[in-house]
Amino acid sequence: MSTLAIDIGGTKLAAALIDPRQQIIDRRILPTPASRTPEALREALRSLIAPFAGQAQRVAVASTGIIRHGILTALNPDNLGGLAQFPLVDTLAQLTGLPCLAVNDAQAAAWAEYRALPGEVRDMAFITVSTGVGGGIISHGKLLTGRQGMAGHIGHTLADPHGPLCGCGRRGCVEAIASGRGISAQAVDALHGMTAKEIYALHQQGHPQATCLIERSAQTVARLIADLKAGYDCECVVLGGSVGLADGYLSLVAGYLAREPAAYHTHLVAAHHQHDAGLLGAAMLAEEDIL
Ligand code: ADP
Ligand code: BMX
Ligand code: ZN
């Protein structure tokens, strides 16, 4: 069965046609609309998937937000232009006439990345450093989603009680400091208003403020990894998202993790599927009928 996989992030929407052997045949990307109202996202999804009409037998969605009973509820609505809720499964079932499954983006990516690891690994965490900071946890070979769909939202654990206010309502979340939006929001003076991508490029040229912001992000993610190791003894952490996969970012995180006591160290690798982990994970979860 071919799957139309869709990845809804805070910055970009991706869709791909995935064949029964989990190979991506064709892929499209559009910017995520920044609007409080569901119509804008519905229209963007309509135009994203239009070229794939009639080519798939089911839809699998990996989306930012807490996904429960097919409905997206934003934990941090700022990441979606203020959009707090969206009926994902109903909308895509209406647009395509196909059966549809939806899961959190980082949970989906965790599953694809877990499948790409050697068989002996049973406990791993996936962290995406992207618009937000998302997470997916595999424990004893099982993906944790949680009764409320909240499992893995480790971007909203506390990094600094005096840190910036997070869009989720807490102060000092990992996400408020380390994410793409967080990096951008903390920038001042000449860097004010720049995207994380632009700030990252300046960091690579040695700009002091840019480097300070990127290093703080990497240090915050390293501490999160140490906390995860303490929390459930994960054997491996996989890093994804456009900030997480940016050239040199993983080495920075690894450097900060190495400064923690040895008991907190864990194997750290870049996402095998790179930016496609969410798309592939959603398709695999649909194929394996796991959720
Ligand atoms: P999404 O959150 O929609 O899944 P991404 O994983 O692309 O999307 O993450 C978007 C964030 O990553 C934005 O804050 C953007 O500025 C930042 N970003 C995109 N490309 C890069 C890059 N090459 N280097 C560093 N940051 C990047
Ligand atoms: C936020 C949260 C998570 C998501 C993570 C990464 C919302 C809308 N999203 O913590 O559900 O997994 O961001 O999302 O509350 P991304 O957009 O960066 O991929
Ligand atoms: Zn938060």
Image (cartoon, grey):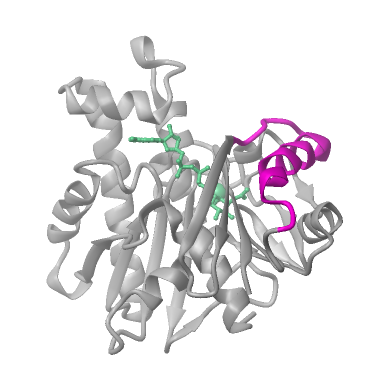
Front residue (pair 15, 235): 15
Residue 151 drawn at (x, y percent): 57, 70
Q: Quadrant of the C terminus?
A: bottom right
Q: Is residue 214 above or below residue 245?
A: above
Residue 244 drawn at (x, y percent): 33, 48
> Where are the magenta residues, as a range?
31-54
Horizontal side, residue 190 vs residue 31: left or right? left
| Figure label count | 0
Q: Is residue 111 above or below residue 135?
A: below
Residue 90 drawn at (x, y percent): 84, 59
Horizontal side, residue 123 vs residue 270: left or right? right
**Is residue 87 among what the camera can see?**
yes
Q: Quadrant of the N terminus?
A: bottom right
Horizontal side, residue 186 vs residue 278: left or right? left
Q: Residue at x 39, y 30 (%)?
A: 196
Q: Is residue 125 above or below residue 290?
A: above
Residue 39 among those drawn in magenta: yes
